Image (spheres, rainbow, N blue to C red):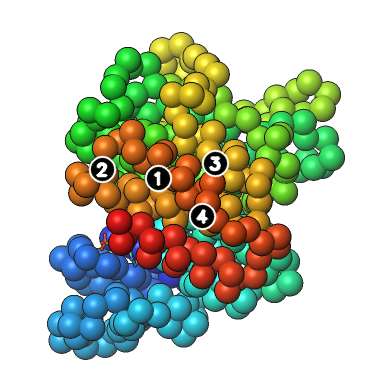
Amino acid sequence: MKKIVILGSTGSIGVNALSVIKEFQEKFRVVGLSGFSNLSLLSKQIAEFKPEFVALPNLKDAAALKNKFKKTIFFSGTDNLVKLTETADYDILVAAVVGAVGLPPVISGLKRGKRIAIANKEPLVIAGKLLRNLAKTNRAEIIPVDSEHSAVFQCLKNENKQGVENILLTASGGPFFSKKIDFKKVTPEQALAHPNWSMGKKITIDSATMMNKGLEVIEARWLFDIPPENIKVIIHPQSVIHSMVEFKDGSTIAQMGTADMKLPIQYALAFPERLKNSFPKLNLIEREKLTFFKPDMNKFRCLKLAYQAIKTGGLAPAVLNAANEIAVNLFLNKKIGFNQIPDIVENKLNNFKNAANPSLEEIMNTDYKIRFELNNI
Ligand code: NDP
Ligand code: MG
């Protein structure tokens, strides 16, 4: 029986992770959950899964829930997530909050030598090298949950890294891939209508700008230790192939499945086991044809900016990520246009003081500085 802590249990990945755990109650048990604003869902999850520990930032909210669930230990305040990951006795940490806020608890899990099933890509984007080193020194595991990286991880199993030519990350292209549309006029409602995946708001907007794929290029760079020039993006609107690896001998291995995050979550929890589940299966005969296209980096400038950031290195990915997180929020709150998201990111990427091999403190300071500057426009 593996003990699981889920950070961000009230989100899209968190809810899917709980469905996987329900499917395999004899294998996994929830010992910790965390929420943020959705108290009614968190309350239902506590009642159903009976975790020993729950984290949520707001002190009053935590006190109100404590009244209802007397046996549960609640952590609150700014470091509620780290208090949870430092205190709970667990085997696997499902990292599924959104944004760079998830970095400290991931570090805490790695320092304790745990398995991190990581959906929360932003910590890998801003501090991937540090996280990889921490995993190595503490014999911790980082198993990707992001569907593309789970696919690559599966394709690379039993392979020698020297034989890899390119990682081919597939992208649906989001809602605007094939549309002639004026990005100045795009509304949050239009950008939130993803054709294939049902996800949280931030990643859905990132998919529409294709920043999501850019973040995933950086994520892959650190997860698999492959140079960025060998990580290519291919548009594949059907989202059947979740990614591929091209080898030096001309072979290409692809991983396929339904567009359901329960699959990569289950894989990360059960690895190296393959467990039989009751989820809908991929039926290739019933599928329409599979198509592939080259991404248009001029239309989707965020993808180009992400390549620029990883090529620049140092603090550039932290700058890219922080500027993007703020820009996406401003767009969702109708303060800026969709077309201004890459403008804001580009401006910050072209105006910051870099450092080679930055420390965690330098990364956090840069993250804070960019957010401070942008929130004060
Ligand atoms: P959601 O927005 O659906 O969920 C985010 C979770 O984090 C919620 O539990 C939310 O709580 C919590 N949260 C939000 N802000 C904070 C904060 N400041 N402090 C603590 N907790 C917070 O996001 P997703 O589940 O879609 O995505 C989570 C991560 O996984 C992202 O990094 C995303 O890029 C990645 N990912 C997601 C995929 C998907 O299919 N959804 C696919 C691949 C990667 P509450 O809801 O209570 O406010
Ligand atoms: Mg993905």
Marks 2/1: CA–CA distance:
10 Å
Q: Is mark 2 within 8 Å of ligand 1?
A: no
The spot of residue 362 in percent (x, y) is 59, 69
Quarter the C terminus occupies: bottom left
Amino acid residing under circle 4: Val
The spot of residue 135 in percent (x, y) is 67, 66
Under circle 4, the secondary element is helix
* In this view, the mark in front (3 or 2): 2
* In this view, the mark in front (4 or 3): 4
Amino acid residing under circle 3: Ala
Query: What residue is disc 2 on?
Result: 336
User: Which residue is pictured at 29% across the width and 76% down the height?
Assistant: 57
Query: What residue is disc 1 on?
Result: 344
Which is more toward the observer, 126 or 92?
A: 126
| Residue extending furthest toward the top | 289
Which callout, 2 or 1, points at the residue further toward the start of the chain? 2
Q: Are marks 4 and 3 in contact (CB under 8 Å)?
A: no
Which mark is on residue 306?
3
Q: Are marks 1 and 3 in contact (CB under 8 Å)?
A: no
Marks 4/1: CA–CA distance:
11 Å
Query: What residue is disc 4 on?
Result: 319
Under circle 3, the secondary element is helix
Under circle 1, the secondary element is helix
Going by the image, does 351 lie left or right of 14? right
Which is more toward the observer, 338 or 77?
A: 338
